[in-house]
Image (tube, rainbow, N blue to C red):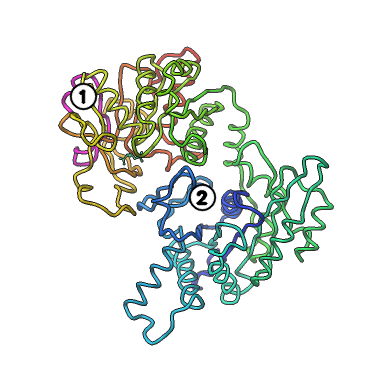
Amino acid sequence: MVIAGASRVVKYIFVTGGVLSSVGKGILTSSIGKMLQVRGSKVTVIKIDPYVNVDAGTMNPYMHGEVYVTDDGGETDLDLGWYERFLDLNLKKENNLTTGLVYKAVIEKERRGDFLGRCVQIVPHVTNEIKNRIRAVAKDAGADVALTEVGGTVGDIEGQPFLEAIRQMRLEEGPENTLYVHVALVPILDVTKEMKTKPLQHSVNELRRIGIQPDIIVARSPEMIDSESRTKIALFGTIPEDAVFCSYNVETIYQVPLILDEQGMGEFICKRLGFPEHKQDFKEWRKFVDAMLNPEHEVKIALVGKYAGLTDSYVSMNEALRHGGAACKAKVCISHIEAESFEKNPEKLETLKTFDGVFVPYGFGPRGTEGKIMAIEFARENDIPFLGICYGFQLAVIEYARHVCGLDDASSSEINPNSPHPVIDLMPEQRGIEIKGATMRLGSHKIIIEPDTVACALYGSNEVYERHRHRFEVNLDYMQRLKEKGLTFSGKSTDGRRMEILELPDRFFFLASQFHGEFRSRLERPDPEYYGFVRACLDKKLGKSKAEFR
Ligand code: GLN
């Protein structure tokens, strides 16, 4: 879409939300990106989080959902995960913009004397910082289209400088290069079954009060909106009826770009932005969505975690399991089990026999760790396929040390700082670090995989890059004992000092990794460890022999 010799014109799409949060803005933004991508555009996506935290790294996943990790070690909002999964992008730290980050930069500039003599204000200094950052991301990505999702709801106090910045961008970039999409809930009343557009109308009014007239309105409704609602939304929103679209409930989230495109949204956006006509090519995407919608098998997985009450805490893991399932034509049913329930009630472990696999995810702090260790022991002893990620990997080492190597009090110094056998210990470079923000071992690091192992068969390579987020690691003092008793470390850091993958070759499938494979998993390209796990769960269920993964 670039004309030779001309400087690249970037088109900016801004997505705002109304009525309440969690209306699926992240999925909508990703879907718009997909509709453009399948028509040949190069896209990038920016998430604005108006909270005062500098990044998502210090937030509790139970309240805010998981922390997503980018290749370059950014600890970001989970929506970046949706963008990466839908659009197969590798985003950077800079793709997540927060109030904390923006103000920090402005204040640092003020201290340096960049604004000498002037009074530093929200307009223009903060808004300029926001606009510059959005433009810099677009330029750095070489994008035709930069989508910006504004987190929260229109009307939130924190969001105001960001909305003001995107309002100004229309003036500066021109109406032909900017597009405002507003999405809001259109509920259906339980009793009368009536569709209610009034809350949406109010949120559009709120947006207009700020000076933004939406070009497109998306109604988020349980069902397709009726024509009466569409007319009302168009009339009160001051937009033509063909600029109103509906994101209704679907079986899988990956259908959303398809249902919006069928309503003509992709074409509408392209025309509005002045793109030459391009036929969409959803063939590949549809193939994977169909595989998800028409499974031939089903596998049941027990996710034994600590934040089990909020599925968003494990969203990338859930999706990676589903991607693995789609590749095996299997529907993956995930039950979230509170690890502490096993501590209170050990008989409950028996219920794990009703599952095809046991999965122990990431985690922090001591709560629930004993329950997770019990689940890992149960899976190992009963040969139920097992996958452990990060904390799940570390707890599998502790379990093995305690129950197979005879080190009864083995633990992690994170759980028990006085353990006589800290088989998991703080990484040397972490000692003395007191600041919590962005100080873990983060992002992509190279891993060397041992030949003739399950990991090697799964990854089909002897080196891979995977993303990390941890402070603790396997204590090398215990390596020999663990190895002698049969624990195989099949993946290591390049210097061989850091254990990255473990496996038990005599089990049907028992594998865990210090890194997080879920962050690189895509519907079209499931992550190998998740795929291997789901495949093993299914094969064992079908009575097949151990997979060779070749
Ligand atoms: N708490 C562990 C550590 O910091 C594991 C972290 C994780 O699971 N992401 O090393």
Q: Please give left or right for residue 270 compared with residue 40 in the image.
A: right
Q: Please give left or right for residue 386 compared with residue 197 in the image.
A: left
**Screen quadrant of the C terminus:** top left
Residue 391, above or below 47: above
Q: Give the spatial CA distance, label 1 vs label 2.
A: 39 Å
Query: What secondary structure is marked by label 2?
Result: helix
Residue 523, above or below 504: below
Tell me where residue 534 appears, x and y as whole percent: 46, 26
Tell me where residue 12 appears, x and y as whole percent: 57, 65
Q: Which residues are magenta?
A: 479-498
Label 2 crowd (10 A; few <14 / some 14-19 / many >=20): many
Q: Quadrant of ligand 1?
A: top left
Q: Is 497 included in the stretch rendered in magenta?
A: yes
Which mark is drawn over residue 482?
1
Residue at the disc numbered 2: 79
Counting residues from the start of the chain, the first of labels 1 and 2 encountered is 2
